[in-house]
Amino acid sequence: MNTKYTVQLQKKASKQLESLSRRSIYLRLRKAIDALAENPRPSGCKKMETKKEQYRIRIGEFRIIYDIDDSVRIVDIIKLGDRKEVYRD
């Protein structure tokens, strides 16, 4: 039985990831995103108070905001970025 989730990046999140200036930050975020396929609710993840099924994980000063759909085993990365800016709409 395959228990992995499919991880998708929304267009906005993909652009945010690709626009990171430091490769080391890119690699840390990419590793965290890839790990969500194995465990979409890792230690330290927080359920967002404002959105029903959104979660966030912290990677240093950066945050990854995502939805989890357990029925179809999909993790949908909505946005990512510096903690000072990621919560702004």
Image (tube, rainbow, N blue to C red):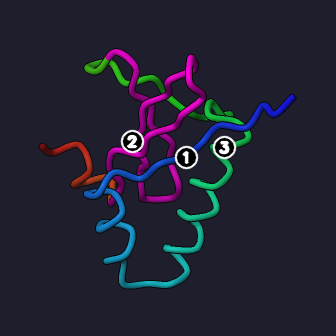
Kind of residue at disc 1: Val
Mark in front: 1 vs 2:
1
Residue stretch rendered in magenta on the structure: 52-81
Q: Position of residue 88 (x, y in %)?
A: 15, 45
State the separation of the CA atoms marked 1 and 2. 12 Å
- Side of 20 relative to 1 (left or right): left
- Toward the viewer: 6 or 23? 6
SS for callout 1: strand
In the image, 73 versus 79, the foreground residue is: 73
Label 3 is placed on what type of residue?
Ala
Main SS class of the magenta portion in the image: strand
Residue type, mark 2 in image: Ile
Residue designated by label 2:
65
Identify the mark nearer the N-term, 3 or 1: 1
Quarter of image, res 44: top right
Report which residue position mark 1 lands on: 7
**Label 2 CA crowd tier, 10 Å (few <14, some 14–19, many 20+):** many
- In terms of secondary structure, where does tag 3 sit? loop
Query: Residue at point 53% right, 63% down?
Result: 29
Rounded to the nearest angstrom, the CA distance separating label 3 from label 1 is 6 Å
Which disc, if any, is residue 41?
none
Q: Is residue 6 above or below residue 12?
A: above
